Amino acid sequence: MSMEQLDRHPDAVHLPRRAPPAYLHQGAARPITIGLVNNMPDAALSATEAQFRRLIERAAGERQVRLKLFSIPDVARSETARDHMAERYASTETLPSAGVDALIVTGAEPMAAALQDEPYWPSLTALVDWAEANSVSTVWSCLAAHAAVLHLDGISRHPLPAKLSGVFSIAKVGRHPLLTGAAGPLFTPHSRQNGLDEGELIAKGYKIVTRSAAAGVDAFTREGASLFVFFQGHPEYDADSLMMEYRRDVRRFIRGERGHHPEVPSGYFEPVVERRLQDLAARTLQDPRPAMLLECAKIIAAHPPEGRWRAGTQRIYRNWLDLVAAGVKARPTPSCRSYEGCSPGAGLREWGCEAPTSQPAGPG
């Protein structure tokens, strides 16, 4: 579908408008356009789209923000998913004519042991290069963050001893405008098999924004032609996202589709629920019957998990939108708009760490 057709489509997302923050000239504010490049597998495609749509809407407040949907052609899709996306998504190859100011790039389901062997690797690295030269800022999520730093600076991710799954307390590292007004304890969900070494990131000039004692580096940035923001975790997750993943993995274990029972997500459920799920997991190991899934669902239903990370996430994304708006105002016309063969140029603007003045966000 062409960008003009997408613009007129009834499902096009026009997010509400918020008065520009004090550091922007009132008359200079204009709508900003965010491109969401959704690489998630078919089963999580719609949920991921909805998660980011709600997050951007809440973070935008009264600011006028538009969300456009994109997909990488080389990500494998079922016919049903392709039909769904045909009416709502454009190929990343259309980005040069899409008029986006910033991007959010999701992770993808790993299909190969090495990222460079993924079928979508050439398209994803082309996207990294295009975003560096043409976006004001880009958010890279989970696997996309790992792929971007590997392509940009040769930093490889490292397998973890076991899957990292849960909600973790994160600490601020220094001052960064992304953290302006983010008061109180901060938390982020993580769900991954690999991680990045903080020392390797710092050695290549990346700035750590938040870290967790249990989960390691959480958010970090790369400041150059475009402000790149990386999240190893999933701050966009809904309250029930980790629960759905856990039940999926339990189901796969019972069906014999995976070799070991998943660990209960850390710091996510109420302590009483966590203990009961751990007891159920021990029994399921000895007797993996489908009835165990029903018992798992009953235990969780008694005390559904809460999304205690969402207020902090909303604040961070509101700050990001403020930075994008400021960058849109300040940036010159990019010298390169083509999608292929793009060489990132020297800074469209200098991204300092003086926090802009902005009103604190309300609860998410």
Image (cartoon, helix red, strand yellow):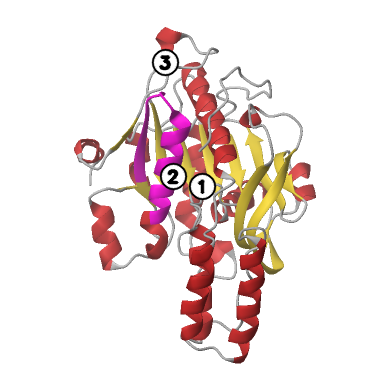
Residue situated in front as seen by the camera: 316 or 296: 296
Q: Which residue is mark 1?
A: 236
Find residue 275 and report its image quarter.
bottom right
Q: Earlier in the sequence, mark 3 or mark 2?
A: 3
Residue, x 64% and y 27% (percent of image)? 180
As shown in the figure, which amino acid type bears the numbered disc 3? Answer: Ala
Q: Residues within 10 Å of mark 2 (few under 14, many from 20)?
A: many
Whether residue 342 is visible, yes or no, is no
Whole-angstrom CA distance, mark 1 to mark 3, is 26 Å
Is 193 within the magenta?
A: no
Describe the element under mark 2 as helix, strand or loop: helix
Whole-angstrom CA distance, mark 3 to mark 2, is 23 Å
Q: Earlier in the sequence, mark 1 or mark 3?
A: 3
Q: Which residue is mark 3?
A: 29
Is 55 within the magenta?
A: yes
Describe the element under mark 1 as helix, strand or loop: loop
Q: Which residues are magenta?
A: 47-69
As shown in the figure, which amino acid type bears the numbered disc 1? Answer: Glu
> Is residue 358 rendered to the left or right of residue 203?
left
* Residue 69 % position (x, y): 35, 44
Residue, x 55% and y 81% (percent of image)? 258
Whole-angstrom CA distance, mark 1 to mark 2, is 6 Å
Q: Is residue 256 above or below residue 204?
A: below
Whether residue 126 is visible, yes or no, is yes
As shown in the figure, which amino acid type bears the numbered disc 2? Answer: Phe
* Residue 272 % position (x, y): 65, 66
- The prevailing secondary structure element of the residues shown in magenta is helix
Q: Earlier in the sequence, mark 1 or mark 2?
A: 2
Residue situated in front as seen by the camera: 82 or 43: 43
Q: Residues within 10 Å of mark 1 (few under 14, many from 20)?
A: many
Q: Are marks 3 and 2 in contact (CB under 8 Å)?
A: no
Residue, x 61% and y 82% (percent of image)? 260
